[in-house]
Structures are given as structure tokens and as C-alpha cells.
Amino acid sequence: MVAYSYKSSFIEPIRLKVKRQTIRLPRKRHARPGEGLQFFTGPRMQPVRIGGAVCVAAREVRLDFRNHEVTQDDAITLSSAEELDAFAVRDGFGGRDRLGLTPWEFMGLWWRLTHPDQPIFAGILIDWDDSFQAVA
């Protein structure tokens, strides 16, 4: 199993099975399709287990917030407002927030605040399916 840690704001969308993907920096080993995923939150030395799921896909992803594009595996490009909003919802930025932003706009704002100086982000997109089970 491969473990991933999340900020507290993503716990509810994960538990509600709305958030079904995570975007991460490249590293030596990410989850592969068919492998189990473990989800945690909290400090690294005292993590709290959220639950787990099964990985269904892991692919390269490029987020371009300036040009409003998501590229997956150098081939699939999402650029319409509907596609970008659906992508953002799947990543835990669902609905319109209190600022009146679309999910994609809210995701872009969050990325700019969390990852300053990175208007283009290249990493790995890990997807899971409906198999998520919360820890009791």
C-alpha cells in the first residue's frame, strides 16, 4: 500500500467520495493501478488514518492555471470551463465557494496560495474509485 497525507480541508470530500484523485510531485514511487492507497491527515509524527481505496490510474499531469488547461499523459487536454470544473471537483474543490468562484477558479487560487511562483505545475495524478472505506 502507498500512503498519502492530506490537509484537513480535504477530509470531508474524501469521506463523501467526492474527491477521487490527488495531484502530487513526482517521487521515486507512487501508487500503481490495482494497489491499495492509505489516506492520512495530521502531523507527520502523529498521523491520523482517514481510510483507504484502490488506485485505478496514475499518470503524468500538467496544470496550467494561466492558460486554463490540464494535460494528462501529454495527450488529454481539458480546457473547457465544464471540463476544468469537473476536474477541480474531483480534486476536492467542489461547488462554488463563498467567494463566488467556480471550482476551477477556487482550485487555481488555492494552488497560487499553496504553491507560489508555480503557475504551471507538473506532477502525477493518482485516481481511485468508489472503493474508499473510511476508518471507523
Image (spheres, rainbow, N blue to C red):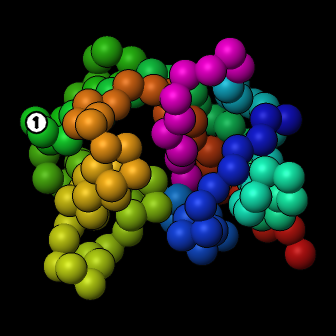
Give the percent coordinates (x, y) of residue 100: 17, 79
Residue 121 found in image quarter: top left
Query: In percent of the image, x 38 and y 25: which residue is there?
Result: 122
- Residue span colored magenta: 20-29
Query: In percent of the image, x 86 and y 52: which residue is there?
Result: 45
Q: Quadrant of the N terminus?
A: top right
Residue 119 found in image quarter: top left
Q: Which residue is mark 1?
A: 67
Decide: is 68 above or below 35.
below
Give the percent coordinates (x, y) of residue 89: 38, 60
Q: Is residue 107 visible?
A: no
Callout 1: SS: loop
Give the number of callouts: 1
In depth, the one of 92 and 53 nearer the eye is: 92
Query: In percent of the image, x 83 and y 63: which residue is there?
Result: 48
Give the percent coordinates (x, y) of residue 46: 87, 59
Decide: is 131 above or below 78.
below
Query: In percent of the image, x 38 and y 68: which residue is there?
Result: 94
Crowd tier of the residue under label 1, counting other residues whose Cα lies within 10 Å: few below 14, some 14–19, many 20 or above = few
Amino acid type indicated by mark 1: Asn
Give the percent coordinates (x, y) of residue 32: 69, 24
Q: Is residue 59 visible?
A: yes
